[in-house]
């Protein structure tokens, strides 16, 4: 991919076969040593329900085997190449992209309470108890 060459990203391979206990899987592009798969999705390929399902199973198998899977569209490659490269570089660095707000400034994280968390907290308050870390009740043994 010219985009990766221009960004100075090396060590990737096209059309890679990965063999896992759950099966053999083909990847569009992979940094094998780093276990990073880069998939380019299109409507034509995913127009079939079984292909769509197989892609999800494949991604789950790869993630469970320790792979990072990045998915991009053709639109991403042609209209947002800088973001594509930045995401691949972040994955290769083993980190995460900094969060950027729409205005280009660093974004602040906002705590969002999950409804399930609120329900669980209310139940703990109503019963006066709860479970400790790891979902175990009682003393550690």
Image (tube, grey):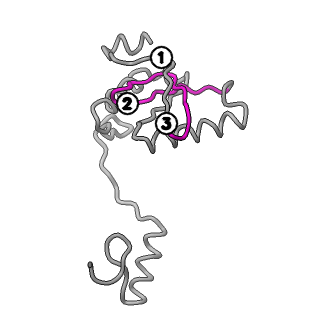
Taking depth in this image into account, of 109 and 61 the one nearest to the observer is 61
Residue under numbered circle 1: 14
Which residue does the image show at 41% across and 65% down from the upper left? Answer: 113
Ranked by sequence position, the earlier of labels 2 and 1 is 1
Distance CA(mark 3)–CA(mark 2): 25 Å
Ranked by sequence position, the earlier of labels 3 and 2 is 3
Residue under numbered circle 3: 20
Taking depth in this image into account, of 114 and 65 the one nearest to the observer is 65
SS for dot 1: strand
The percent position of residue 119, horizontal first and vertical second, equals 47, 76
Marks counted in the figure total: 3
Q: Label 1 near label 2: C-beta < 8 Å?
A: no
Residue under numbered circle 2: 87
Ranked by sequence position, the earlier of labels 1 and 3 is 1
Which residue does the image show at 62% across and 25% down from the upper left? Answer: 42
Taking depth in this image into account, of 4 and 131 the one nearest to the observer is 131
Q: Quadrant of residue 74?
A: top right
Q: Is residue 30 magenta?
A: yes
The percent position of residue 97, horizontal first and vertical second, equals 32, 36
The percent position of residue 125, horizontal first and vertical second, equals 39, 85
Q: Quadrant of the N terminus?
A: top left
Q: Quadrant of residue 94?
A: top left
99 on left or right of 47: left
26 on left or right of 12: right
25 on left or right of 68: right
Extent of the magenta region: 20-43
Mark 1: few, some, or many residues within 10 Å (few <14, many ≥20)?
A: few
Picture layout, residue 40 above or below residue 100: above
Distance CA(mark 1)–CA(mark 3): 18 Å
């Amino acid at each position: 991919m010219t985009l990766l060459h221009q960004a100075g990203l090396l060590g990737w391979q096209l059309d890679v076969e990965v063999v896992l206990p759950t099966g053999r899987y083909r990847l569009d592009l992979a940094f094998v040593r780093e276990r990073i798969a880069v998939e380019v999705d299109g409507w034509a390929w995913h127009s079939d329900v079984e292909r769509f399902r197989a892609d999800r199973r494949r991604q789950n198998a790869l993630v469970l085997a320790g792979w990072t899977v990045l998915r991009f569209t053709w639109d991403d490659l042609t209209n947002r190449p800088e973001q594509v490269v930045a995401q691949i570089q972040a994955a290769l660095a083993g980190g995460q992209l900094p969060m950027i707000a729409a205005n280009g400034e660093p974004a602040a994280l906002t705590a969002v309470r999950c409804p399930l968390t609120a329900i669980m907290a209310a139940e703990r308050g109503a019963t006066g108890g709860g479970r400790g870390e790891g979902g175990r009740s009682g003393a550690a043994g």
